[in-house]
Image: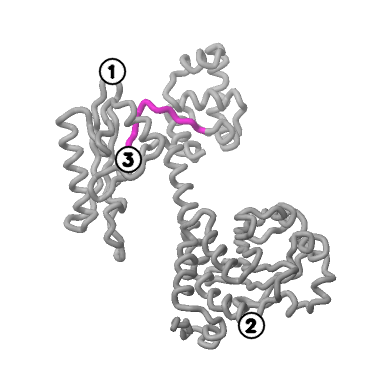
Amino acid sequence: METKWAPEEGHAAGELADVSVAQFSGLMARIYQGPLENPPWAGALELIRTSLNANYATLILRSPSSDRRGLMVHASELGPGVPGEASYNNYYYSLDPFVGLPADRVVTVDEVFGDTGWLASELYQQFLKPADIRYIMGADLRTESGVECRFRVCRGHDAKQFSARDKAFCALLLPHLRRAVELHSRLDIVESERTLYASAIDRMLVGTVTLDESGAIMRSNSVADEILAEGNGLRMMHGTVEATDAKENRNLQRLVRQALMGHFGTAAPMVEAMPITRGGDKPKLGVLVRTIPLSDWSEDNKRRPATVLFLRDPDRKSQGSQEIVRKLFDLTPAETSLALLLTNGLTLEEAAEELGISKNTARAHLRAIFSKTGVTRQATLVRILLGSVVPLG
């Protein structure tokens, strides 16, 4: 005899839903896996759709409005894409009366509007009827952090109205779907911040190489990739970072081992710097080795970031945005071009030649730059530009 699931959280709903332990377990697995999928919850929605004999199951993560595009995830008989999604986002959302539902409560459109009122609605007549959508069951989810999304399940005209069992089935899922949405929101915020900070590091021309607990490379940014690809001073060997000079490499590996000890807690977290010699009269690379400590509740994971290497190449020139420099200091385009070249280490004469202007014209631009920035020396100008938000642009 198959065991039925009737959790403490809604015992009556559990019995009415008539869901087996195996079926409920499978649904929970897909719901909590949803935040890691692309698109999120595609697997869970398809399982819900087939379990309810529906033609569509949709999660509206971001409701459309006049000033933003909606974001929806679908499971349908046609696959993940829905032909009318663009039309709904662009116009029909404004006709949708099935919104603003009570939080975490499953209802049908016929319960809210009556079958006559629903079938007479503009949304049904103009948009849903041609798409073979007659019955809709849904709930609005609101998480603790303020995330709001909509869950909708649809059936066609040849299907039956959603039953009390169908509603109870969805009611069982809602608390878990709400928690999974909260997890997705937090992961999304962390990823957005990571991307933002990584972009700022790239703009500052800092190479980053993240190492795992064994010292193997987990990830690196484009600046680090270029430095390692040159193989001058530093290189990638067998999935690790090595210095090309044997003595410097021994020192580098010693620092990495010390940083890893700080990660495991057998030594204090450390930050150490060392220079790396390069051939061809190039200036030395700067390397900073920093421990990434375990948090108080870190799991046992050998592929966890443990150490990071920060790389700086003095030869790399700032790619500051001309528009940012111009707006920040109210410079003309010509003055901006000169200021950026000076920031990158060129003399006034070299900058004039690079720009194809005379020395006298360059001096006139420099005087205007001094006046607008409030400095009187070229070295001070460079320091101000490098210390501003220009490198982040």
**Can residue 263 be found in the magenta stretch?**
no
Residue matched to label 2: 164
- Badge 2: how crowded within 10 Å, few (<14), some, or many (20+)? few
**Residue at horizontal 46%, vertical 62%?**
33
Q: Quadrant of the N terminus?
A: bottom left
Residue kind at label 2, given as amino acid type: Ala
Task: Measure the alpha-carbon separation of dots 2 and 1.
Answer: 78 Å
In the image, which disc is placed on residue 140?
none
Q: Earlier in the sequence, mark 3 or mark 2?
A: 2
Left or right of 318? Residue 118 is right
Q: Which residues are magenta?
A: 310-320
As drawn, is 300 to the left or to the right of 94?
left
227, 155: nearer the viewer: 155
- The label shown at residue 310 is 3
Q: Are marks 2 and 1 in contact (CB under 8 Å)?
A: no
* Colour setting: one colour
For disc 1, the marked residue is 280
From what the image shows, is residue 350 above or below residue 315? Answer: above
Between marks 3 and 2 in the image, the one whose residue lies nearer the viewer: 2
Above or below residue 302? Residue 120 is below
The CA span between labels 1 and 3 is 22 Å
Of 172 and 328, nearer the camera is 172
Disc 1 residue type (three-letter): Gly
- Measuring from the top left, give residue 255's x and y in whole percent: 19, 43
Identify which residue is drawn at 46% across, 42% down.
Answer: 200
Q: Nearer the viewer, mark 2 or mark 1?
A: 2
Residue occupying image coordinates x 27% and y 31%:
234
Tell me which residue sits at (55%, 27%) in the image.
Answer: 369
